[in-house]
Image: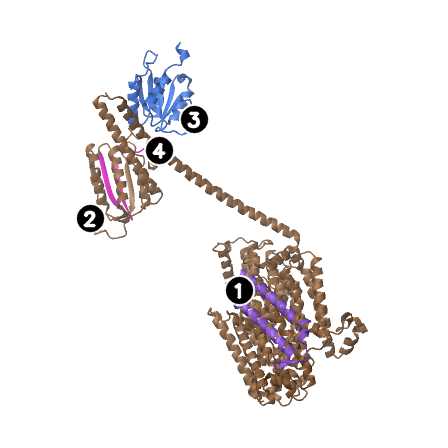
Chain colours: A brown, B purple, C blue
Amino acid sequence: MNLGLISFVALIYIGALFAIAYYGDREAERGRSLINTPYIYALSLTVYCTAWTFYGSVGRAATSGVDFLPIYLGPTIMAALWWFVLRKIIRISKIQHITSIADFIASRYGKSALLGGLVTAMAVLGVIPYISLQLKAVSYSFTLLWHYPNLALPDLDAIPILRDTGFYVALIMAAFAILFGTRHLDATEHHEGLVLAMAFESIVKLLTFLSVGVFVTFTLFRGTGDLFARAAMQPDLRRLFAFDQTPLAYQNWFWLILLSMFATLLLPRQFQMAVVENVNERHIETATWLFPFYLFVINLFVVPIALAGRLLVAGDVSPDMYVLLLPLERSANWLALLAFVGGISAATGMIIVETVALSTMLTNDLMMPLLLHANAFSASRDLSSFMLNLRRGAILLVVFLGYLFFRLTGKTFSMVSIGLISFAAVVQFAPALLGGIYWKGGTRRGALLGLLSGFLVWAYTLPLPLLAQTAGLGDAFIEAGPWGVSWLRPYALFGLTGYEPITHALFWSLLVNASLYLIGSLWSGESALEHRQAALFVDIFRHVGGSEQVQIWRGEASPLDLQTLMQRFLGRSRAEQLLSEYARTRGVTDWRALETDADMIEEVERQLAGVVGAASARVAVASIVTEEPLDITKVIHMLDETSQVVAYSRQLEQKSRELEAATAELREANRRLQELDRLKDEFISTVTHELRTPLTSIRALTEILYYNPDLPAAQRQQFLDIITKEIARLSRLINDVLDFAKLESKAYDWNLKPVNLKMLISDAFDATRQLFLERNITVRMELPDDAPDALTDNDLLMQVILNLLSNAAKFTTDQVTVRLRQEGDFLRVDVIDNGPGVDPAYRETIFEKFSQVPPPDGIRRQGTGLGLPISRAIITQLGGRIWVEGKPGQGATFSFTLPISPFKPSQETSHATT
Amino acid sequence: MNRYRLIGQRLAALAFITALLLNYPLISLFNADRMILGAPVLHVYLFSVWLTFIGLMAFFIERRE
Amino acid sequence: MPQPESPVPSHPPRVLIVDDEPNIIISIEFLLRQAGYTTQVAHSGEDALRILQQEPPDLVVLDIMLPGMDGFEVCQWIREHSEWNHVKIMMLTAKGRDAEISKGFALGADAYITKPFSTRHFVEEVHRLLTPPAEDRI
């Protein structure tokens, strides 16, 4: 086929992929999430189906029948358990800001950097061959399409790198991963464009594969019946219809199901898609059946295509390529091209997601901890852009390691064998991860032992013999064992024979791994941090938002130190924003005002964990929290039990300080309450006293009148007068008390409006004119016409003025002056008498309720003792001031001020009162 | 939450049964050189158990109480 | 009003009324004079002490809420001076709480009547205080 056409179609497809990812990211930036649906989530999970599925399943079916199926049956069974397992992993990861499976395991076992590094190394070593397999698939399919009908696969060594399609695919994939996989520094943020593009790819690979399947089954044959019938006529094809009749075949089958069950959970790209990119926990629900259904549909035509290939494709050709070859054989070039695009989509999806996942692990769990330990950063350096570049570098590294592996070994291995080797590598994570979320007893040492031993057994029983074969030393090594030690034969360890290598390796590695994990855990103690993390992971559903964590305090650091640290990794504005948000949750407006405590350090660590991973975040935070250059012994020391105890007691101290403060506050509140109570009591007792006084006179005089019917008329009259006055006084007092209570309780309905004071004073004077006339008092009014209105309550102010006038009438000798004038923004009213005046010592006291002020001239006058207090309460609430001046013996001047109304003088009011 | 646990338990039971159905010895009952519905009986068996399992999961999950 | 039995002493006993309420003074003066006692009035505690020093009365009818020195202080002052031992003290006040009554007796008051009072009870109490005990009479 035309090279230009093939390249053109491939580039169009990849261009579309970029466009979709770009679109997804752009929409996300505008706040519209396209991936927030369970369908996109389920589709993105089908990144599980790689070129291995697309080409390799057919290849395997063509040689060994239904043996390709366990790889899809396992995930189907696992999907049913997602309800518990995946949900738990997602919940933990969201709360702990987990960025990858390495991060997850490291976090679980006390944020161990060592463990994170080990898992990363295992994942990279295990998965790189898998990436190379994808490149190989693309490269071969491309070559096949191009050179058809020449079926000879090219000799890789003869192709210079620059003419190798695999190289360019690797390059483009790296570019894609960098563009859409490192958009945010925070690796826990979702890569919306990436996920959207993966969902698109999953549809493309499904539809193209189905097209080939339908074409083969219904165009080349008359349906499946016809196809199977014709295959059944050939004995070596009929053999594929059933298993070998050996129990070992069933055991291989079982182990492959188990292997793929765990692989759906543990492959870095599956973890990335299912956990890190998960937007909503509830998306699991739909994915639980939709993802297996996808697997079911894409596998429907595997056997027909395989059988058709065996029947129709002649010559020595890899059955892996039947998907392309069948259309080509029948000159359905467009379909072959379509199938090629489907193969690309399957391969690229895997490469991209795997690369992003591995690069995150490499930077966060391997490079950063090493760099931090090595103290490679000057304290002031802004690390946020460095982090991003580091991750980009890691992407390039992963992709080209994959490519390199392909170039070195590509000739030798079939797709499925490499794929299964990778599966077996990641399945080593199962004991540590599953044990970690369901068993609190799992410890760091147990996890380390299990992982390491499992990995070593895996390496010895799977990749090593293959590599030995590649190097040409294989046969002796495999057949006789190293140095001729037969029980060390890599495919028959301890003489266990008869299994396929993959089953054999799985059995031994998982056995050793799980046993050492258990034994290591049971025979080692755990630090407090490990203990806490264990509880957090296992009991995740009992924790609400993870906020009620047992906090471990690790020394001194100011909020500013923490800010500086965050700034280095997150950039200034993001650090500022996160700290402010945090401060708000603590009820503080400025984070600088925060006390650094365990909770705050936790938070900083969590935020950093999203960027650099839990282990690195811990190291980074520890480096400033202890305020000294960090070395590994320090880290260990920080974790050891004694410092935990110190930390705990310090925390206790802090708690008890808080408690003391709270108690003091309570005591103060109680004291004030009691004081209020006392004041109220005093008021009541004073009021009763004041009520009893007139009652006393009334009762005594009434009894006198009753028992002495023959009193002289004049005396009778005098007593009756007194009784009448005292009764009047009593009712006045009751009214005053009620008024006062109302004013005090602020329950009064204030009716504020502009009031013309001249009018008001004149009206008040008219009401009290009789008092002045009786005592022959001259009253002078100095009320200017142009005085502005006051903003006040007419009725209440009237009460004040009446009160002052009647006081003046009671105390003055023969003259009272009332003066109104403006003073700045206030109006001032003076009521001046020439009576005995007020002793300076009592100038404040007389405004207190029921004050016992001796009459200036010894003469006790009628009054309730509430007039002036009420006046003061009114004037104060109206926004003014009331006071008294004047020297004793020279009369008293009672004055008050009121704010001027901001409104124009109200014509209405003046007319009404005139 | 109750519905949640109920579905979870149903799914787990289903997974257990399916795992049994898809493994030795039950699978060996269908491992015969016979054809049914125009396909080998083993293939038909595996694909129908598979599809039934998926269908039941979807039924349990998507059925709204 | 029935006349109480005449007191024994040759001259009528003198009662000092200490109160700042003119209308109450009027009623008390009327009751005491009607009962045959001589009355004197003080409007404040200080007034009362001045009168005491000049011419100690036989009985002081003492209000508590007074301008300046209050009734308790006046009572205490009287009891601190042995030369006024024979002066009887009757608290006549609106303060009627148990604590105040106890305080009054503790400071040396001989009777404690709360306002508003029954005129009959008041006169009987005055009479009781100004009548020497039975043993002394024989």
Rendered location of residue A904, percent (x, y): 24, 53
Q: Secondary structure at mark 1?
A: loop
**Residue A118 picture quarter:** bottom right
Q: Nearer the viewer, residue A216 or A508?
A: A216
Q: Chain of mark 3?
A: C
Do marks 4 and 2 share a subunit?
Answer: yes
* Circle 4 residue: A688
Q: Secondary structure at mark 4?
A: helix
Mark toward the start of the polypeptide (4 vs 2): 4
Do marks 4 and 3 share a subunit?
Answer: no
Q: Residue furthest top?
A: C138
Mark toward the start of the polypeptide (2 vs 1): 1
* Circle 2 residue: A912
Left or right of residue A200, residue A862 in this image: left
Left or right of residue A189, residue A857 in this image: left
Give, as a single range, the part of the protein colored magenta.
A815-838
Rendered location of residue A800, percent (x, y): 28, 41
Could you tell me the amino acid type at mark 1? Gly
* Circle 1 residue: A571
Q: Mark 4, mark 2: which one is toward the viewer?
A: 4
Instruction: Quote the CA–CA distance across marks 1 and 3.
Output: 77 Å
- Dot label at residue A889: none
What is the magenta segment's predominant secondary structure? Answer: strand
Q: Residues within 10 Å of mark 4 (few under 14, many from 20)?
A: few
Q: Secondary structure at mark 3?
A: helix
Could you tell me the amino acid type at mark 4? Thr
* Circle 3 residue: C102
Q: Secondary structure at mark 2?
A: helix
Do marks 4 and 1 share a subunit?
Answer: yes
